[in-house]
Image: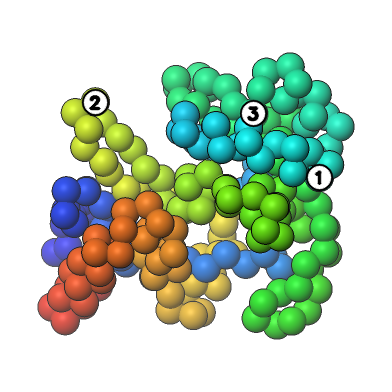
Amino acid sequence: MLPPILQIGDILISSDILTERFCCDLAACKGQCCIEGDAGAPVTLDEIAEIEDALDEVWSDMSASAQAVVDQQGVAYTDEEGDLVTSIVGGKNCVFTYYDDIEDFTTKQPIHDCCLCALEKAFRNGHSSFCKPISCALYPIRVKTFSDGTIALNYHKWNVCKDAVKKGLELDLPVYRFLEGPLVRRFGQEWYNELCTVAKELKAQGYI
């Protein structure tokens, strides 16, 4: 039986990161993860500084309500669990969300009124060196840091992402493969290669 928790290097990971399938389907969900929930995206102090540096570049893409929230409390706040998170509007929308039409990169068909990230837009247009909080890029993986410094990665299951699960199953794309870029960005290529090696060994043994 596959143990529920594995250790890759000095990081603990939930085994369902290897066994579950996932691939974002913006045509179906239109970016609901940025507008649902009761708190913003987890951020670090360094990320807050980078967001503040990028604020002038994204200001015009933010709604008037979002601008008012940032003027009042800044780009981030401490939520009920004591975590630093991006500021939100109306109890749910991240202040950096905006809506636009995009092209589905697989079907080449337009996706209308999709919820997008102003920070990522500025980065992709070459106007900022900061893409978006790593917690956003890593979703549906959530990072937990314990008091002793131990880092654990968990797969967060959310009904909002049911279409991503369906698409991941259709493509047979494991969570860790879908998130290769963000995982490398956060933990490095060497660690990710070790993760892939462990996954390959477990698959050969019939565990995944």
Looking at the image, which is closer to me, 51 or 31? Answer: 51
Judging by the rendered image, the residue that carries numbered circle 3 is: 75
Label 3 element class: loop
Which image quadrant is residue 8 in? bottom left
Q: Residues within 10 Å of mark 2 (few under 14, many from 20)?
A: few
Q: Which residue is at the front of the view, 92 or 74?
A: 74
- Quadrant of the image occupied by residue 59: top right
Nearer-N-terminus badge (1/3):
1
User: Quick one: SS at disc 2?
Assistant: loop
Q: Residue at x 19, y 28 (%)?
A: 148
Image depth: mark 2 or mark 1 in front: 1
Image quadrant occupied by the C terminus: bottom left
Among numbered discs 3 and 2, the one appearing first in the sequence = 3
Label 1 sits on a secondary structure element that is helix
The furthest residue to the right: 64
Write down the quadrant of residue 81 in the picture.
Answer: top left
The residue to which callout 1 is attached is: 61
At label 3, counting other C-alpha atoms closer than 10 Å, the crowd grade (few under 14, some 14-19, many 20 or more) is: many
- State the image coordinates of residue 116 (x, y, percent, origin top left): 71, 53
Disc 1 to disc 3, C-alpha distance:
14 Å
Q: Which mark is residue 198?
A: none
Res. 159 visible in picture: no
| Pick the front one: 110 or 1 | 110
Above or below for 180 versus 171: above
Counting residues from the start of the chain, the first of labels 2 and 1 encountered is 1
Please provide percent x and percent y for residue 110: 81, 73
